[in-house]
């Protein structure tokens, strides 16, 4: 819509709160592809992704109309966090996957935070073949682990941003990544795939 060209998402959100329904249509048009890609990557099922996408936007509308959004300059970030919460609600209903996950409190205080973060930074030099192999095995990870890997490698978010977005501590984000890498290494070994994942699991 030409009328909205040049306007930021945050401005459109506030326009919608003020009663302009076309502003919301523009917001949906701008963000639906990125949001659906994120949801689909985590849940890996078209029908479930569609349901979660619809529920996410119902919650977005409800929160906007209730005045629960303030212009922070991060509308997509806010949108993704709502989607994350809807995904986690779905995941809690689907519990029972037999794969290694962190404990309830996920205490990683015995690990050196600096060395762990340095290890993850080194991931940027991982070769394309390794990434391709990892991507093929992502379907087997639980959604919370798949989500943190997606956010770190494909959205290139920092662990601080991931923690803020998913509503957990940085340690929990690091823990989910660590368990994801443990599971990926286990799957790689079972399938005789060579993966240079030493960076992640030190």
Image (cartoon, rainbow, N blue to C red):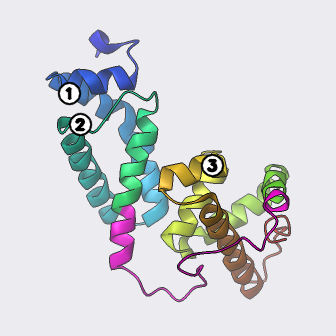
The answer to which of 184 and 10 lies nearer the viewer is 10
Q: From the image, tell me which residue sits under label 2.
A: 64
- The residue stretch that appears in magenta: 87-116
Closer to the N terminus: mark 2 or mark 3? 2
Magenta span: helix, strand or loop, mainly? loop
Disc 2 from disc 3: Cα separation: 26 Å
Crowding around mark 2 (Cα neighbors within 10 Å: few <14, some 14 to 19, many 20+) is some
Give the percent coordinates (x, y) of residue 80. 42, 47
Q: Secondary structure at mark 3?
A: helix
Q: From the image, tell me which residue sits under label 3.
A: 160
Relative vertical location of residue 90 with respect to residue 5 in this rendering, above or below: below
Give the percent coordinates (x, y) of residue 10. 37, 25
In the rendered structure, find residue 165 and report the number of the disc placed on it: none
Q: From the image, tell me which residue sits under label 1.
A: 17
Q: Secondary structure at mark 2?
A: helix
Disc 2 from disc 1: Cα separation: 6 Å
The answer to which of 194 and 155 lies nearer the viewer is 155
Q: Is residue 66 found left or right of 157 in the rendered image?
A: left
Q: Secondary structure at mark 1?
A: helix
Give the percent coordinates (x, y) of residue 201. 80, 71
Relative vertical location of residue 2 with respect to residue 66 in this rendering, above or below: above
């Amino acid at each position: 819509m030409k009328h909205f060209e040049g306007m930021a998402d945050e401005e459109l959100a506030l326009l919608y709160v003020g009663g302009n329904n076309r502003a919301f249509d523009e917001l949906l048009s701008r963000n639906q592809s990125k949001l659906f890609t994120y949801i689909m990557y985590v849940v890996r099922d078209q029908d479930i992704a569609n349901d979660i996408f619809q529920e996410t936007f119902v919650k977005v509308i409800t929160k906007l109309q209730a005045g629960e959004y303030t212009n922070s300059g991060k509308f997509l970030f806010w949108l993704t966090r709502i989607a994350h919460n809807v995904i986690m609600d779905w995941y809690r209903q689907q519990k029972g996957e037999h794969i290694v996950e962190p404990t309830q409190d996920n205490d990683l205080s015995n690990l050196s935070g600096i060395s762990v973060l340095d290890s993850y930074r080194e991931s940027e030099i991982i070769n394309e073949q390794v990434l391709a192999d990892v991507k093929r095995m992502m379907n087997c990870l639980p959604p919370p682990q798949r989500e943190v890997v997606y956010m770190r490698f494909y959205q290139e978010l920092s662990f601080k941003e991931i923690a803020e977005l998913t509503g957990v501590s940085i340690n929990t984000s690091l823990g989910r990544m660590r368990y994801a890498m443990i599971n990926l290494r286990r799957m790689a070994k079972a399938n005789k795939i060579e993966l240079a994942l030493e960076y992640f699991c030190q």
